[in-house]
Image (cartoon, rainbow, N blue to C red):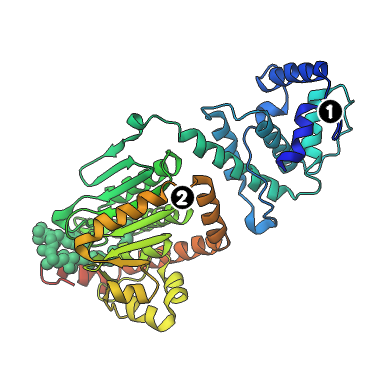
């Protein structure tokens, strides 16, 4: 694709070398055109993606993604160069107007001809594919543009008591930091994690890690979230928690970069179910995986009702999600929930060495590979998440759930 565009950019007829005078004129016009001296659709468009030739509506970006990509182009820190701008232009036109039907500009109208050639070269590429390719290209440009942020500015992104977010060596790490409460997730932490993921998806890091401080990875939802709710607000709180849950899980479904869980110790509830949405899960041999939903009068979330049966087969998934069987790290590895298990005493050293090496890989290639692996399932996962959240809102107001939570909060029960 690149080489097909080159003649268009230089204004050359393929196979005919340009004269020096022609090259000078083309260079001048191209400079004016691309530096904004020319008004027209090129100012509306901006960055695209390498032609992936992944076709068909299954790979199509939404109009919202497309609109976002157009805005992102304006934020690029570096001029992407004429070749890329031409691709962006062509993909924008194809995505918004379809195949090129405009009359061919005259040979001496170099700039218009370059634009026309670029658009025309897309032939009958479907609008949806052009839209997707535009989004991909912008995303790849944003990633490489962001990676030029100075290391000092890039080091620390956010810090709060319960969540610590750092970015170093190409890795953004989101660390749950409530060790005294086994890293149980408060309402504020769900919100902060969503914000951290959003920032990580746009920062210069190449991979993103979620891990815990202290002896636990995470003990799941903080059951105190259910405390002090006036009786007439119970239903309303259940509904708003379901919306929070749905938005939270959606962020994991949509996260564009490689996402790695570094499971440093036991994991409970939502911190286990979410693992199915990570790309890689590394666990200490001290970690356990526990989803005691029935014990709590609750139901599975994090898309686990769909992913776990597919991953480990329905009966192993049933043992976990219906009967609350706690898995050891080795059992979780055998079920495909965990990628690799490390001895606890060398866990941190081995895992971070591996992650640092991964974080040196080309970021766009990693994102594209992830998208190709995950895209087909995305719509399904959003639907599963919506349904699980809806059902949980019902469970939270059930007698079974209220009894279980009261028992825990009054210190009468523990898992
Ligand atoms: C809006 C989105 C909603 C998403 C819904 C998700 C569903 C789930 O995640 S369900 C899973 C909920 N989690 C639990 O049921 C775990 C409850 N915790 C325990 O059973 C135990 O604490 C433990 C087995 C995790 C650890 O036991 P251990 O004896 O080692 O330590 P503790 O002394 O019990 O814990 C220390 C400290 O931390 C508090 N704590 C631990 N986990 C939670 C939690 N999930 N919610 C609230 N508080 C928790 C525990 O109460 C102790 O506090 P104190 O020191 O103040 O007594």
Task: Tell me the quarter of the image containing the C terminus.
Answer: bottom left
Element on which disc 1 rests: loop
> Which mark is drawn over residue 310?
none
Mark 1 Cα-neighbour bin, 10 Å: few <14, some 14–19, many ≥20? few
Q: Position of residue 115 (x, y in %)?
A: 77, 31
Q: Secondary structure at mark 2?
A: loop
Identify residue for label 2: 257
Q: Name the spot of residue 206 as percent of width and height, x first.
A: 43, 45
Q: Sort mark 2 into few (<14), some (14-19) or many (20+) by Cα contacts within 10 Å.
A: many
Apparent side of residue 256 relative to residue 268 in the rendered image (left or right): right
Q: Residue at x 86, y 39 (%)?
A: 101
Q: In this figure, what is the number of numbered marks?
A: 2
Q: Name the residue that disc number 1 marks.
A: 17
In the image, what residue occupies the spot 32% across and 51% down?
A: 190
Does the beta carbon at disc 2 come under 8 Å from ligand 1?
no
Residue 31 showing in the rendered view: yes
**Residue 63 occupies quadrant:** top right
Furthest toward the left, the residue is 411
């Amino acid at each position: 694709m690149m080489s097909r565009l080159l003649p268009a950019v230089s204004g050359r007829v393929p196979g005919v070398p340009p004269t020096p005078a022609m090259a000078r004129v083309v260079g001048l016009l191209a400079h004016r055109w691309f530096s904004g001296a020319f008004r027209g659709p090129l100012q509306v468009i901006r960055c695209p993606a390498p032609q992936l030739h992944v076709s068909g509506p299954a790979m199509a970006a939404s109009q919202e993604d497309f609109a976002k990509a157009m805005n992102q182009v304006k934020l690029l820190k570096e001029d992407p160069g004429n070749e890329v701008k031409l691709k962006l232009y062509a993909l924008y036109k194809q995505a918004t107007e379809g195949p090129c039907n405009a009359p061919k500009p005259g040979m001496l109208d170099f700039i218009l001809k370059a634009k026309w050639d670029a658009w025309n070269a897309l032939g009958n590429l479907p609008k949806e594919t052009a839209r997707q390719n535009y989004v991909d290209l912008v995303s790849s440009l944003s990633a490489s543009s962001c990676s030029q942020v100075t290391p000092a500015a890039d080091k620390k992104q956010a810090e709060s008591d319960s969540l610590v977010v750092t970015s170093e060596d190409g890795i953004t790490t989101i660390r749950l930091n409530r060790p005294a409460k086994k890293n149980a997730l408060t309402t504020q932490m769900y919100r902060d994690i969503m914000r951290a993921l959003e920032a990580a998806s746009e920062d210069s890091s190449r991979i993103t890690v979620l891990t815990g401080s202290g002896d636990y990875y995470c003990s799941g939802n903080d059951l105190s979230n259910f405390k002090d709710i006036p009786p007439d607000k119970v239903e309303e709180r259940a509904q708003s928690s379901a919306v929070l849950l749905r938005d939270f899980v959606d962020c994991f479904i949509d996260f564009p970069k490689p996402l790695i869980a570094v499971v440093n110790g036991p994991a409970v509830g939502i911190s286990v179910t979410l693992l199915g949405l990570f790309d890689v899960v590394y666990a200490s041999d001290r970690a356990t995986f526990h989803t005691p939903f029935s014990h709590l009068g609750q139901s599975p979330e994090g898309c686990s009702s769909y992913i776990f049966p597919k991953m480990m087969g329905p009966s192993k998934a049933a043992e976990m999600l219906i009967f609350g069987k706690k898995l050891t790290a080795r059992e979780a590895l055998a079920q495909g929930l965990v990628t690799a298990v490390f001895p606890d005493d060398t866990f941190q050293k081995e895992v971070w060495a591996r992650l640092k090496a991964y974080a040196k890989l080309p970021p766009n290639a990693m994102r594209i590979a992830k998208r190709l692996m995950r895209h087909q399932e995305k719509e399904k996962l959003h639907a599963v998440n919506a349904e699980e959240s809806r059902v949980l809102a019902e469970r939270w107001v059930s007698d079974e759930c209220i009894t279980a939570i009261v028992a825990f909060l009054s210190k009468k029960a523990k898992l």
